[in-house]
Image: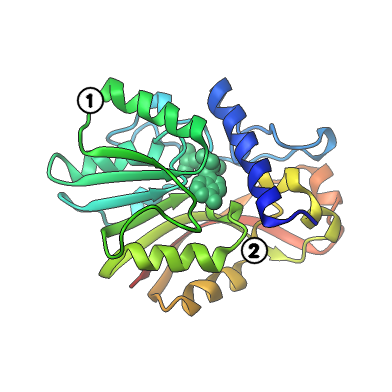
């Protein structure tokens, strides 16, 4: 088994590759790039293009939900997007918070931050900021955010307890998060769990849905609610790696309050 640090290096190098190629055929994207040849899978991203604030150059096809749609973001809010990639959800959130608010994207991959900053330079927003940093140690002060969003990222973070504790720490009292993420129903085989490549592809780092929700509960979030569930269609080859154990992979969009 790879150590958490080794896993992060694999994740970082895969997303650096995607940022540089800007192909939009990403790990958590609509086509596969991170899979060993025979283990292809498909994740269908929701359509962002009709959302107010949508920026095509920021949409690398890496999301698995529309967290901003369920996040209850208001004009003037301070929003933090964890694992912000090229800024897809950040710019949608910016359209909602307007001039008076602020949106901060955090990502641990330098190449993604560069891409997001280039996108922002073209848009000229002075209330959008991208910070290089790890979700397990978010480079932001306590109680800063009205809303935390994240799209298809926390499955990639080795220590999910730490990730949700950090979300809790940066939220203002009474504030909330809205996260879209991958979860599984049923057991994954050891072969699948061990694959660092599949980890970077948002599959083998995904938790059981119950376990995922338990972590959120144990972090003391209240009024936890799944706003949307979407089944992810996997290839026959990937399913065959799992025998009868894995019942399905899902994208969920979940909210919780501090
Ligand atoms: C699947 S992509 C999603 C990007 C973006 N949310 C979107 O929907 O376009 C995952 C992103 O999370 C970042 N990431 C993964 N693990 C992270 C961590 N521990 N800390 C910060 N960023 C992380 C990756 O660098 C990558 O940009």
SS for callout 2 = strand
Q: Which mark is residue 124?
A: 1
Relative to 187, is 155 on the left or the right? left
SS for callout 1 = loop
Q: Nearer the viewer, residue 45 or 136?
A: 136
Residue that badge 2 annotates: 207
Residue 94: quadrant of the picture: top left
N-terminal of the pair, mark 2 or mark 1, is: 1
- For the residues labelled 2 and 1, the Cα–Cα distance comes to 38 Å
Image position, residue 48 (x, y; %): 41, 36
Tell whether circle 2 marks a residue whose Cβ is less than 8 angstroms from ligand 1: no
Relative to 98, is 107 on the left or the right? right
Residue ID at (64%, 35%): 14
Residue ID at (74%, 62%): 247
Asked whether the residues under the numbered discs 2 and 1 touch, taking CB atoms below 8 Å apart as contact, a structural biologist would say no
Residue 13: quadrant of the picture: top right
Q: Nearer the viewer, residue 168 or 110?
A: 110
Image position, residue 215 (x, y; %): 54, 73
Q: How is the image coloured?
A: rainbow
Residue lying at the far left of the rendered structure: 100
Image position, residue 30 (x, y; %): 60, 34
- From the viewer's perspective, is residue 163 above or below residue 100? below
């Amino acid at each position: 088994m790879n150590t958490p640090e080794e896993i992060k290096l694999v994740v970082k190098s895969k997303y650096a590759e995607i940022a540089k190629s800007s192909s939009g055929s990403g790990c958590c994207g609509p086509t596969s790039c991170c899979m060993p040849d025979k283990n292809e899978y498909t994740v269908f991203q929701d359509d962002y293009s009709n959302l107010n604030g949508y920026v095509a150059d920021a949409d690398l096809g890496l999301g698995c939900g529309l967290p901003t749609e369920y996040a209850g973001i208001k004009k003037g809010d301070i929003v933090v997007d964890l694992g912000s990639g090229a800024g897809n959800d950040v710019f949608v959130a910016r359209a909602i918070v307007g001039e008076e608010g602020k949106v901060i994207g955090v990502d641990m991959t330098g190449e993604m931050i560069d891409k997001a900053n280039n996108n922002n330079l073209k848009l000229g927003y002075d209330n959008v900021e991208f910070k290089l940093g790890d979700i397990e140690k978010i480079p932001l002060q306590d109680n800063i955010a009205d809303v935390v969003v994240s799209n298809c990222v926390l499955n990639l973070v080795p220590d999910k307890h730490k990730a949700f504790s950090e979300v809790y720490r940066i939220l203002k009292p009474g504030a909330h998060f809205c996260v879209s993420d991958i979860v599984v129903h049923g057991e994954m085989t050891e072969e699948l769990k061990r694959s660092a490549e599949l980890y970077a592809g948002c599959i083998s780092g995904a938790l059981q849905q119950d376990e995922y929700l338990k972590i959120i509960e144990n972090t003391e979030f209240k009024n936890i609610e799944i706003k949307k569930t979407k089944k992810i269609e996997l290839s026959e080859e990937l399913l065959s790696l799992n025998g009868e154990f894995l019942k399905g992979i899902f994208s969920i969009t979940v909210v919780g309050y501090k």
